[in-house]
């Protein structure tokens, strides 16, 4: 089936998120013995369509996908995967060169493509604005960053490590504080977190509403603010305690489903395929079965069992992470924010003064990126 671009609703643009769930996909017909086996099978499908590029940052998730891809390619007699790295010359917090070299050298990969950018990947840079003109405002607003990578693998395949935060380990799941309490000596703080995680739905939802009501969202007027709080409360309402059930919910989140479909639709414009293997149904199902009710433990443990034989121990144990905010919110977006006349957005949901203040802050709130692109698009002259 051909994938289609997902265009956000006015409310989703204001909130900067796509809340909700779609109907859960059916369980995969083929059940794999392990998550590693499932990942190898999913990645093989992309390797069989060379050239196969791997969006590679040097982080643990993209390194894991690259390592498995290299192992499978050599086992099957296919061309090696091509690590493709975005290098942000003017964003020092995004610098990962040492980790990248460690992984590439360890895997013995000779063809490593490094694409250098200054502000070309800004959310209002040339790649983003070209996409906005062609396709309109899409979810996710950062999907355009795939474009230069897809150009390199035109006619082939692109894969990445998206989803690792959510599916590798229990840290993003409601069961985490209970599992940690079970596995180590309790502290008063840990006991409190575990009790909150196991509380009835009504109490948990009330807690989330209180928490989100304290979160600063100066760009939202009261109707938008209430929708923001309600969206987060509904996420808590729908959450489940079991890790196995919770991790399976990831694949049916509207944000995940529509982002994946949009990225695949963009890949099709380059005659290429796109996949995030860690979010593939067969892989998620295998991780759910391995994790069971309490979950598999922290991410480092999961990565060790998944690719401990393929990657350096130092990489698997690293706790640092690159920050890309200054790479995507640089000169073009700041210049537009300063010159913006306040027009073009939903006046019932968005406070222009608060929004401009958020855009010009040292750290721009990620949920306002969609509004930035929407305002820019509205400011463009209409074609006659």
Image (tube, rainbow, N blue to C red):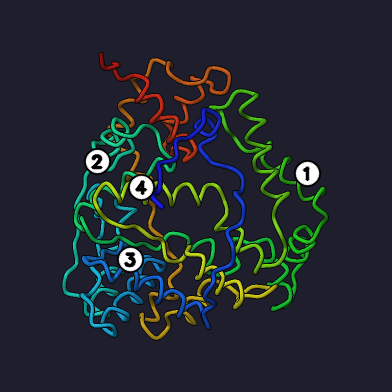
Compared across the picture, whether 93 is left or right of 181 comes to: left
Tell me how far mark 3 sits from mark 2, CA to CA. Answer: 21 Å
Q: Which of disc 1 and disc 3 is earlier in sequence?
A: 3
Tell me how far mark 3 sits from mark 1, CA to CA. Answer: 39 Å
Tell me how far mark 4 sits from mark 2, CA to CA. Answer: 25 Å
Task: Please name whichever residue, 368 or 269, is drawn nearer the observer in this view of the structure.
Answer: 269
Residue lying at 20% horizontally and 55% vertically, measured from the top left: 154
Q: Which of disc 2 and disc 4 is earlier in sequence?
A: 2
Residue lying at 33% horizontally and 43% vertically, measured from the top left: 328
Residue position marked by numbered label 4 in the rendering:
265
Q: Where is residue 109 in the image (x, y as percent from the top left)?
A: 21, 75
Residue position marked by numbered label 2 in the rendering:
119
How many marks the image carries: the answer is 4
Compared across the picture, whether 56 is left or right of 40 comes to: left
**Residue 206 marker:** 1
* Neighbour tally class for label 1: few under 14, some 14-19, many 20 plus, Cα within 10 Å: few
Question: Viewer-nearest of labels 1 and 4?
Answer: 4
Seen in the picture, residue 351 relative to 248 is either above or below; the reply is above
Q: Please, what secondary structure does the residue beneath circle 2 have?
A: loop
Residue position marked by numbered label 3 in the rendering:
58
Residue that protrudes farthest toward the front in the picture: 1
* Neighbour tally class for label 2: few under 14, some 14-19, many 20 plus, Cα within 10 Å: many
Tell me how far mark 1 sits from mark 4, CA to CA. Answer: 39 Å
Q: Do the residues labelled 3 and 1 touch (CB within 8 Å)?
A: no
* Neighbour tally class for label 4: few under 14, some 14-19, many 20 plus, Cα within 10 Å: many
Q: Which of disc 4 and disc 1 is earlier in sequence?
A: 1
Compared across the picture, whether 323 is left or right of 85 comes to: right
Q: Which of disc 2 and disc 3 is earlier in sequence?
A: 3
Q: Do the residues labelled 1 and 4 touch (CB within 8 Å)?
A: no
Residue lying at 37% horizontally and 66% vertically, measured from the top left: 62
Q: Are marks 3 and 2 in contact (CB under 8 Å)?
A: no
């Amino acid at each position: 089936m051909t994938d289609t671009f997902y265009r956000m609703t006015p409310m989703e643009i204001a909130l900067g998120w796509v809340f909700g769930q779609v109907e859960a996909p059916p369980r995969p017909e083929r059940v794999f013995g392990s998550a590693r086996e499932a990942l190898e099978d999913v990645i093989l499908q992309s390797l069989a369509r060379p050239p196969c590029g791997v969006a590679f940052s040097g982080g643990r998730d993209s390194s894991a996908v690259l390592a498995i891809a290299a192992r499978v390619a050599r086992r099957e007699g296919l061309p090696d995967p091509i690590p493709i790295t975005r290098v942000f010359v003017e964003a020092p917090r995004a610098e990962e060169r040492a980790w990248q070299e460690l992984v590439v050298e360890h895997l013995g990969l000779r063809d490593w493509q490094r694409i250098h950018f200054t502000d070309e990947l800004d959310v209002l840079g040339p790649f983003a604005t070209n996409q906005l003109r062609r396709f309109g405002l899409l979810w996710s607003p950062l999907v355009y960053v795939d474009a230069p990578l897809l150009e390199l693998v035109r006619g082939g395949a692109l894969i990445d490590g998206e989803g690792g935060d959510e599916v590798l380990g229990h840290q993003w799941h409601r069961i985490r504080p209970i599992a940690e309490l079970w596995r180590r000596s309790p502290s008063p703080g840990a006991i409190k977190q575990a009790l909150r995680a196991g509380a009835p739905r009504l109490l948990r939802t009330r807690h989330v509403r209180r928490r989100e009501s304290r979160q600063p969202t100066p760009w939202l007027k009261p109707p938008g603010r209430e929708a923001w709080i309600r969206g987060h409360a509904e996420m808590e309402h729908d959450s489940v305690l079991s890790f196995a059930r919770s991790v399976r919910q990831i694949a049916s989140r509207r944000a995940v489903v529509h982002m994946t479909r949009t990225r695949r639709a963009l890949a099709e414009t380059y005659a290429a395929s796109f996949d995030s293997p860690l979010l593939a149904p067969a892989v998620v199902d295998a991780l759910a079965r391995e994790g069971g009710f309490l979950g598999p433990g922290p991410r480092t443990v999961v990565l060790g069992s998944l690719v401990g034989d393929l990657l350096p121990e130092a990489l698997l144990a690293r706790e640092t992470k690159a920050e890309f905010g200054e790479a995507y919110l640089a000169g073009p977006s700041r210049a537009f924010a300063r010159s913006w006349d306040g027009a073009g957005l939903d006046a019932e949901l968005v406070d222009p003064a608060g929004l401009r203040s958020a855009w010009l802050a040292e750290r721009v709130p990620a949920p306002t990126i969609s509004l930035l692109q929407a305002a820019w698009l509205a400011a463009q002259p209409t074609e006659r």
